[in-house]
Amino acid sequence: MAAALLTAVGIGLLGLVTTALFGLRGTDISRHISFGFFSTMVTMLAHSMMMFYLIGKGKAVKDAMTENGITGDYFRRIAGARKPVFFIGMLAMGVTMIAAIMGASVDTGVLPPVVHAMIAYGAIACNLAAVKIEIDALAESGRIVDEVNRLLGS
């Protein structure tokens, strides 16, 4: 599941970069809009699913500890690992949405393209940061789950 989530985040990020390249060329605006809309939706879905997945991992660890009388700081550690994902994931989703909405303003002539472009580049940067933090959180939560599974004898 973690690999699928990272693939979805990667596809969304690749789509955002491709969208930016179409926008820079300025020759195929309909493709820029289509890729931008699709990439925004994929990015939002991927980051939100990543958050739900990490919530589920934490719940599973907490339940396993409670049901089997395991003591330790496993739940606290998994909660600490997932905490930065919520901030950067929401930031990446928010900036990506703002860039997409501002794109509509550029299309109608209300906003200059450079403003949309700067926000879009910020969205790409936020999504790159999110990928790094999400990879770290998935790795750490995987290690914690492995420790709990060893204690359970699984």
Image: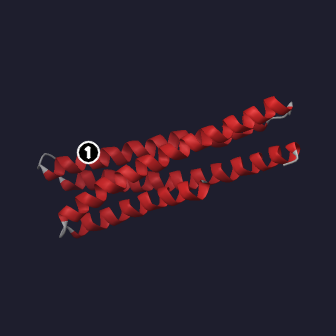
Q: Closest to the observer: 82 or 116?
A: 82
Q: Closest to the observer: 64 or 117?
A: 64
80 w.r.t. 130: above or below: above
Asked whether the viewer can see residue 125, the reply is yes
Q: In this view, does 117 lie to the left or right of 147?
A: left
Q: In this view, does 59 lie to the left or right of 69?
A: left
Residue at left offset 24%, top offset 62%: 32
28 w.r.t. 64: above or below: below
Residue at left offset 55%, top offset 42%: 51
Residue at left offset 71%, top offset 51%: 142
Q: Percent x, y for residue 138?
A: 64, 51
Colouring? secondary structure
Asked whether the viewer can see residue 85, the reply is no
Q: Is residue 49 left or right of residue 37?
A: right
Q: Is residue 106 left or right of residue 39?
A: left
Q: Percent x, y for residue 11?
A: 44, 61
Q: What element carries label 1?
A: helix
* Numbered marks: total: 1
Q: Percent x, y for residue 69?
A: 86, 30
The residue tagged 1 is: 101
Residue at left offset 31%, top offset 62%: 19
Q: Percent x, y for residue 144?
A: 76, 46
Amino acid carrying label 1: it is Ile
79 w.r.t. 150: above or below: above
Crowd tier of the residue under label 1, counting other residues whose Cα lies within 10 Å: few below 14, some 14–19, many 20 or above: few
Q: Closest to the observer: 80 or 51?
A: 51
